[in-house]
Amino acid sequence: MRRLLKRSWNYGLLLLKGAMAARRWLLAYVILILIPAALLLYSYTQKSSQIIEEEVTRTMLQTIKQASINLDYQFDSVRDTSNIIFMNPKLHQYLSSTASIGQQLDSLKELRYLVDNAGTNPNVMRVRLFVNSNRIFSGERVNFFTLDSLKGRPWLQQVMDAGGTIVWTGAYQESYLDPGPVYVFSGARMLRDPEVYDQISGVLLIDVAERTIQDILAKIKLTQEGTIYLAAPDGTMISNKDKTLLGSKMEFSEVLAAFGQSEEGIIPVMKDNNSRYVVYTTLRSTGWKLVAEIPKAEITSRATALNQFSGIATLSSVTILFLLLVFILLAVLVRGMNRRMQSVIMMIKREGIESLDERSGMSEGDSNLLENSVDHLIHKVHDLMEETYRSRVQEREAQLRALQAQINPHFLYNTLDTINWIAIGRGAHDISQMIDGLAKYFRLSLNKGKDRVSVSDELNLAKVYLDIQQTRFPKSFEFHIEAEAGLDVYEMPKLTLQPIVENALLHGIRKSKGKAGTIWIRAAMEGDELVLSVTDDGIGMQQELVDTLLTEPQPAMRSDGSGSSYGLYNVNERIKLFAGEQYGLTIGSRLGEGTTVVVRFLCLQSDQHNKA
């Protein structure tokens, strides 16, 4: 036992002496490995935290934009109710200064019905009509009030200046006979005497309970400590969970400046010595700003902790591995220089350091060879750390790009469908038709992420595109689509015809003298080949241009807001990659007579047809 302890003591002393002798190695390690690694990890942590902050705040902006759509729907519903009452002739008969008592009573029956019917709208809390005191039931104080009772209201002058246009008040406390004091918004509009137009005969108020709006805002879960509220464009607090803040001004001058410059944005601010983000968007129906304040620390705390743990773990691992390597080398040196150096050299050779083979013939001695080998190993570790850092950054950026790409097509379709029905409900059939065409275009072009579509879907996509363009350019062109029967069993690359059709319309027909013409689209089988053609009677092209379209890339072409086209060269290259070099496009055109583009490739049956 004593001998074992003595051997251990001696061995420890030898290691200590070796460590003292290797102090230059340790210094080189600190300068070449530890400090650069720490700087790289710090830079990586800062960059990744910045990227995470940007993506999280963008996501929060999208969230409150969705909430603003819901709020717009609520306020639009109340506005429609106000319009229905405002346009009713019985209201104007009741307000007329010449109306008899009998006429007023007759009008009140209709007004009572309108008020009761408005109460069925879940967004309407109460309808109030403020009229001159000489109107019967003006002192009823449930739905009818005297005009004098509005005096002193801070928003009354704004309502009068609006001249009958609806004005939205901020949240304020109103005392009803039933249910008592409650915070409400009011859509107010001035009413004129129909007999004496210059005379003001009343004010119509449609009240909305603030708790209805707060319930919507409460469902927005951004962070634990974040707050969300409504503010006027000048920064006045319109609605807030903390009622003591109503009517106060926002304290962020940079946010107020941004309100006047853009409808939405993300602004970094300081509040109580803490960094925060102010994310805002604009309500279309009222012009108010939906604002969310989020502490920056709450966004970055978890990401920073993760990055710090990862950085410390990586740095510690590298340190431990390197020190372990150093102590192993020292132990080998202490027990036998020559044998240990040869062992380390063989180990490094097994790791694949090719430079040792080149230097093995030099008469530098084993010490220099070992020193150079370790130095080479240090640089290799340094390079590996840099490579690891770059790969981590690229991985993070790839993850963030993937998050950006996760847009749910179903949400897009449902939103377009909702807009479509709203347009139909309001009689905007031209808007409904265009939205329906756009929804079909997205559905066909996205194709659930697949690169190949059936021939019929590709033809339908071209038809939907031309339908939309007919809405844009009414009565300027016609189109005809002819297809052989039985082509549904074949597939082709998606978005093949659309760029060609776009070229025919925008750079053929729309550039002709009359800016009008016809497009013919045909699809047929020729043996085992599928042939599609797009013909227009537009302006045509010179033969010199036709000869270069498919042999070299062309600059992106634009036409009066049309955006850039795919280019016939790109379509031709895609078809060659899809079907082979012997397939692709051919172009025939004569200046002033039109252009024909023919698409030809080998027929490929769809997977569903093969399974059948």
Image (spheres, grey):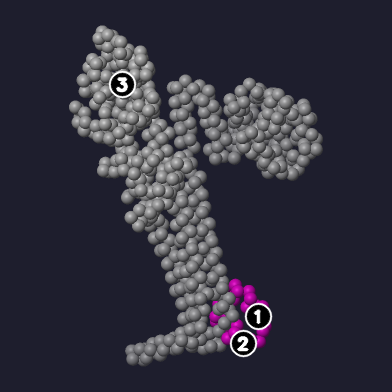
Residue ID for mark 1: 359
Task: Name which of mark 2 and mark 3 comes first in the sequence.
Answer: 3
Task: Name which of mark 1 and mark 2 comes first in the sequence.
Answer: 1
Residue drawn at (26%, 8%), measured in percent from left and top? 102
Residue 386 higher or lower than 281, as above or below: below
Image coordinates for residue 253, horizontal then vertical, percent: 40, 48
Q: Taking the image as drawn, is residue 227 in sight?
A: yes
Residue ID for mark 2: 365
Residue ID for mark 3: 202
Name the image quarter holding residue 374.
Answer: bottom right
- Which part of the image, by quadrant, shows the C terminus? top right
Q: Taking the image as drawn, is residue 78 in sight?
A: no
Which amino acid type is marked by label 2? Gly
State which region is magenta.
Answer: 342-369
Say which of marks 2 and 3 sits in front: 3
Does the segment drawn in magenta span residue 349? yes
Marks 1 and 2, Cα distance to the nearest angstrom? 10 Å
Q: Nearer the viewer, residue 342 or 575?
A: 575
